[in-house]
Image (cartoon, coloured by chain):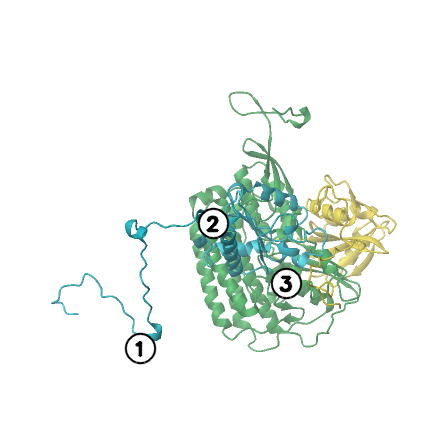
Amino acid sequence: MSEAQAPRKTRPPYVPDYGAEAERLRPVELPQTRAAYRVVLPGVVQMPVDTVLAICRKSSLWPLTFGLACCAIEMIGTFMSNHDLDRFGVVPWPSPRQADVMIVSGTVTKKMAPAIKLLYEQMPNPKYVISMGACATNGGPYTQYDRVLQGVDKIIPVDVYIPGCPPRPEALLDGFLKLQEKIMEDRRAVG
Amino acid sequence: MTSVPKQFTPTRQVPRQGLAEKIRRAVPNHIPLEFGETKTDVDVRLKPEHLLEVVRVLKEHRDLAFDFLRNMAGVDMQEQGLHLKIHLYSFKHNHTVQLTVECPPEEDHPHVPSLTSLYRAADWHEREAAEMFGFIFDGHPNLKNLLLEEDLHIHPLLKAHPLQEPEILQGIEDGPPGFPF
Amino acid sequence: MTIWPEEAIVRRHGETEFEFDTVDMTVNVGPQHPATHGVFRMLLTVDGEVVVDCEPYIGYLHRGLEKLTENADYRQAMGWWDRTDYLAGLNCEGAWCMAVEKLAGIEVPERAEYIRVIMMELSRINSHFMFFGAFGADVGSFGTSFTYAWRERERIYDLFEEVAGDRMFPTYFRIGGVTMDLPENFEARCRWLLGSIRQGLEDLDGLLTGNEVFVERCRGLSPVTPEQAINWGLTGPLLRATGIPWDIRKVEPYSIYDRLKFEIPVGTQGDVFDRWMVRLAEAYQSTKIIEQCLDEMPKKGLVLNPNLPKTLRIDSGEVYFRTEGTKGEYSVYLMARGGNKPYRAKLRSPSFCNLSALREMVIGNYVADAIIILGSLDIVLGEVDK
């Protein structure tokens, strides 16, 4: 650029050069639909209330940090920077009174079962349970020992089951996304 | 730090030649002992009533100096009764011994003297052996259940205690999973 | 107002200018708690803020390792054993495989031994990083130390996945060697990873060790003398922090550790700060071990004993195989009495034995310090509850 010209204040818009595939790849310009109210009051969104509530609930799920065994390590790994769960609004919270979802990660023994039931009952509605790993689903590799509870769904209702021993952090992310879909689907039912 | 050597000479095989003779010389002759060998240690078999005296000798004798309790494991040898395996280690001489306490087969709940007066580490090992096999340790300050619930009186590691069946859900018609060896 | 029975009340005079009676309070640090590392419960009896009595309750994760091992083949049982110390799965797999090999008299090819040592030391570094992260969280840097620690842990997990297939419990070891050989770019990847681990150790060191709050909280907290440590049955970094240079890899060496040169870091007082420093130095020594293995490893060779029987049957024998686990002495007592299943397999876990000494260490300190002492023991509940 020659110095004699006045310095540019704005950049020219970037138009990518598609070459041979130009017709196929150029983005399609959608027609702008402007309803009357959007012209009068721009920035207003119209949505049913249950959808709004469901979106709020699914976007801010606070799990109770309930790591029992090995799956807890993968759960902590999912909260960490590499497979960040914070971008989904998920903040691990130690107190059951303010938690939304309980991730049961690890083997549930019969000695621990009353504590789990108590924690579940201490959580306020609406609450969800994710059963993470094979042990919480049906006892896992330890299912034949008689002090092991064969699945946490024998004492509390479970919404999402995540298989694996332990499930990868991406699997837990997938479980959260499925739970979010479930919350959206159930939006008419939840009060 | 009186009796702890600053350097430990690493050896491939922990020296155990002569350990059996040293133990036999140190322990008074009226106590019957039988000696054997496992793949890693010297094995000393004895009866429960002599246990406390033998362990005291092992701990306090100058050439033996077993000051560290490594492990206590019960074994259910069905017809031969319950055995208790104790592993001791000496920091001074760098040798390990395995004691096998052979309890008589008729007793369901054999009495074994507790080693908590000699080693504080024996506390939890004895509680676990008691609840898993049914030993009763005389002289233990707090013989409650450790790993199982407090009011549960079962002994899971006995051979007679069964496993629980895995739950067969619908859709698996052939039976429980696993390859029959 | 509850009427307490007279025997249950311990009356104490407060140490103020006003003489009044106080009652001890029971605080339950329950099985679900952000600071207990896993499902561990302790009942603290506190007089004000000072802990007067502590009763630990374990068994909330008792999954029946020993009973299940008696009902499974020698090779199948490894799947439960590597979930005992779930922070360092390969270390436990190594201990089980080596114990069975000792019992059955099976030789392991040399290249497999070197691969095993590399994997086991990487697991040890993995476990120590978890300690750094969790202990930093206990002391007060709530999430920062965790995120620092997890950066390196994820990289180590990536390496495990490349080599063995799974992140945490790859069941990569077999009785008689390892499953498959290393990939071609392993050496370059591993050296890069070692550099990254050293950088991570320096970052954690810089974050916490010189931090005034950290030093004030940890220095002089619950010192342990060597005689006490031996009587209580402590092993591992807790014993080395008291001053005794005892490491099973040097004293009763197994595998190829007698050919490797490394140092044993030792503390002075046995307090919480010494335990932190010992673990930091140990992680650094592990990187040196891995480098030596990469240099000395035979470039080609078998990785699995070719003469293994189809079903491993052992007629008789007992073995007490001790290894240096990440937390202390991780030993396997194995007895065989015919057949293809072990007759009795007992795990002597370091966390179980270290945890039994918790009560003596905690009494006389504040409640917040009790949490730090529990964190410095570095327990993993899979080992404690078996």
Judging from the image, mark 3 belongs to the subunit labelled C
SS for tag 2?
A: helix
Question: Which colour represents chain C?
Answer: green
Identify whether A179 is placed above or below C2: below
Percent across and percent down for residue C36 are 57, 46
Locate the N terminus of chain C and report the quarter of the image it occupies: top right
Question: Which colour represents chain B?
Answer: yellow
Q: Amino acid at mark 3?
A: Glu
Judging from the image, mark 1 belongs to the subunit labelled A
Name the front one of labels 1 and 2.
Answer: 2
Determine which quarter of the picture holds residue C337: bottom right
Marked residue nearer the N-terminal end (1 or 2): 1
Residue C58 shows which numbered tag?
Answer: none
Give the letter of the cyan chain. A
Residue topped by disc 3: C93
C-alpha separation, residue under disc 1 versus residue under disc 2: 45 Å
At 55% across and 77% down in the image, what residue appears?
C299
At 67% across and 65% down in the image, what residue appears?
C98
Q: Is residue C242 left or right of residue C313?
A: left
C-alpha separation, residue under disc 2 versus residue under disc 3: 46 Å
Determine which quarter of the picture holds residue C57: top right
Residue topped by disc 2: A54
Q: Residue furthest left?
A: A4
Q: Amino acid at mark 2?
A: Ala
For label 1, the crowd category at 10 Å Cα-Cα, with few meaning under 14, some 14 to 19 and many 20 or more, is few
